[in-house]
Amino acid sequence: MAIFLTGQSRVMIQGITGSEGRRHGARMLAAGTTVVGGTNPRKAGQTIELNDRQVPVFGTVADTMAATGADVSVVFVPASGTKGAVIEAIEARIPLCIVITEGVPVHDTAEFWARASADGNQTRIVGPNCPGVASPGKSNAGIIPADITTEGRIGLVSKSGTLTYQMMYELGDIGFSTAVGIGGDPVIGTTHIDCLQAFQEDPETDAIVMIGEIGGDAEERAGAFIEQYVTKPVVGYVAGFTAPEGKTMGHAGAIISGSSGTAQAKKEALENAGVRVGKTPSETAALVREVMRSR
Amino acid sequence: MDLFEYEAKELFAEYGVPVQAGQVAHTAEEARVIAARYAAQGHPLVVVKAQVKTGGRGKAGGVKLAEGPDEAYAKASQILGMDIKGHTVHTVLIAQASDIAAEYYLSFLLDRANRTFLSICSVQGGMEIEEVAHTSPEAVARIPVSPLTGVDHAKAAEIIAAGRIPAEAAEGAALLAERLWAMFTDEDATLAEINPMVLTKDGEVLAVDGKVTLDDNAAFRQEHARFNDLSSTDPIEARAKEKHLNYVKLEGEVGIIGNGAGLVMSTLDVVAYAGQQFGGIKPANFLDIGGGASAEVMANGLEIVLSDPSVRCVLVNVFGGITSCDAVANGIVSAVAMLESRGEHVDRPVVVRLDGNNAAEGRRILSDAAIPVVEQVGTMDGAARRAAELAAKGA
């Protein structure tokens, strides 16, 4: 099954003619992803060559969907154009929109998230500032390297890109059903909780690895969710124990967060929910091995 | 980016949020001149306020009332140079004192957890707002604000009413809220806080203190460079910023270079754990060279990290994802050569851990280069331990 992204997914790229869009479009194709097309309003009607394949370029997301049956969009457009691109995808009601672009102003993210919510979240948004979603052996949408891991039965959700790669590599012999890089921005579309729920329901996932970072209270909320709803084993890792305290200014931040957002607080919240938390990435990988062996 | 109070008030004023007249002084003499001018205008009473980017200034003695130029001079002399929670006071704001009838609280901020904006408003403003929020949460109203509809006059009135701001201040406060929201959105702020928002005895509502945080990601469409503050930035951080490196100075002995914020943060943790066995060795910095890691970026990164005299050993921890490790290894080799050619001899040990995409080729390139200071270790934990050990030896 995998979550969000399967072997049947038909992937399009917003910003397919840009250097990132072309480069990663070619990589995705090489990884076996069904890349059906992409957009550039100024190059509609043309094709672009990716790995010796001619891929059609359309003017809009809606046109691409109509012509190709695309149901996943990967956004590579620069930060200044990201809000417009994502809103276009939402209006076209594409089921999944993965926003790779980094440096998106948070007012823009809050706005496109509000648009998606107002539409009943017909479009699932992943990111921004994320490495994408990879279901090894099936499909790869984003910039996660396809060749560092194999297909298997671990589900992974992570705020951090390189820690995702590190973990997939370390556990490459066991393999992954799906890895979702949700991104570390203050506002993101798909959360740890969304992924935990999807992995819990996925018959092809046996255990879940959750990687967090300092800031916000997403991990604390995930802990509460796990306690209530997740019966599959969860192994956690949190980065940033020695990071300096964030320059949170003003009283407003402290009032709203209610939690300090430190790595220690997150680790404790996860452990209280029965999650085994590794002290280092390699210790975390060892815990996952133990969990998978005891099944 | 956090702003100083006086910068926040500059932005407020641009959007028509009423503030007291005030001006910044860098010396006590400047404070005297400003106070003298205000006195001549019929406002002898001024407040001398330390400009530091931290809370608790009042309690630390960084805010003082002064009557007339001489007292302003004396109070400014006391406050300038003061240390408030590790922040040295370089400037003071000389503000005309207001005749305060009541103090309220108003802010707009990003609500991460709910992925929207939030307004917080309370009739009980002032220094104890956190305490109020804790002991009587019902006195602190939190009103969600949708990015799609924002704050018009009706929404502003709703916020002010929810905060139980009394009738005599309600209209002024609502107008202020509407304008503060305009500033919050137009300037890409993630926090705009007024505490206290004051009702004067003349019935005016104004911002007496303000805190603003701006979103650095919006720099491409904002003119916020004018708020860059190099004076209170660490000098190595300032140089790193010039080279577009994502560097944060820490107190420790092991210089850290890695790719990806999460992996670098994780590397800091692993070095700190390993360092416990070597007398408390700690990471000296955070440096994320990002995905590309060209030779030049690596050279600049090494140069910045080595320019910190407390660094006794460098740990390069790279996981090759998209970038393959042979490119990273070539980057390290040319970085060392580039530094040597610039006359900067690399004399401290550099522990390198390469893993992931094309790691074997990367390791071979480093072995063949046989750079005396470069030592390879196969695992992240092992590399951290070795770096901590070398840093302890280098003491």
Image (cartoon, coloured by chain):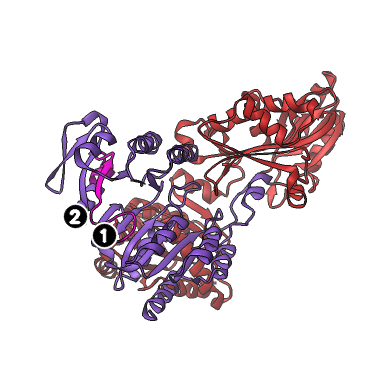
In the shown orientation, is residue B205 left or right of residue B215? Answer: right
Farthest-out residue, top: B41
A254, above or below A154, in the image: above
What residue sits right under mark 2 in the picture? A30
Quadrant of the snapshot with the N terminus of chain B:
top right
Q: Position of residue B263 (x, y in %)?
A: 43, 61
Q: Position of residue B382 (x, y in %)?
A: 42, 75
Colour red maps to chain:
B
Mark number displayed over residue A146:
1
Q: Which residues are magenta?
A: A1-23
**Residue A19 falls inside the magenta stretch:** yes
Which picture quadrant has residue A30?
A: bottom left
> Of the residues under marks 2 and 1, which one precedes in the sequence?
2
Q: Is residue B31 visible?
A: no
Circle 1 marks a residue in which chain?
A
Label 2 vs label 1: CA separation?
A: 9 Å
For badge 1, the amino acid type reads Ala
Q: Position of residue B19 (x, y in %)?
A: 72, 27
Colour purple maps to chain:
A
**Disc 2 on helix, strand or loop?**
helix
Q: Nearer the viewer, residue B1 or A184?
A: A184
Circles 2 and 1 in contact, beta carbons < 8 Å: yes
Circle 2 marks a residue in which chain?
A
The residue sitting at 38% across, 73% down in the picture is: B379
For badge 2, the amino acid type reads Ala
A41, above or below A53, in the image: above
| Disc 1 packing (10 Å; few <14; some 14–19; many ≥20) | many
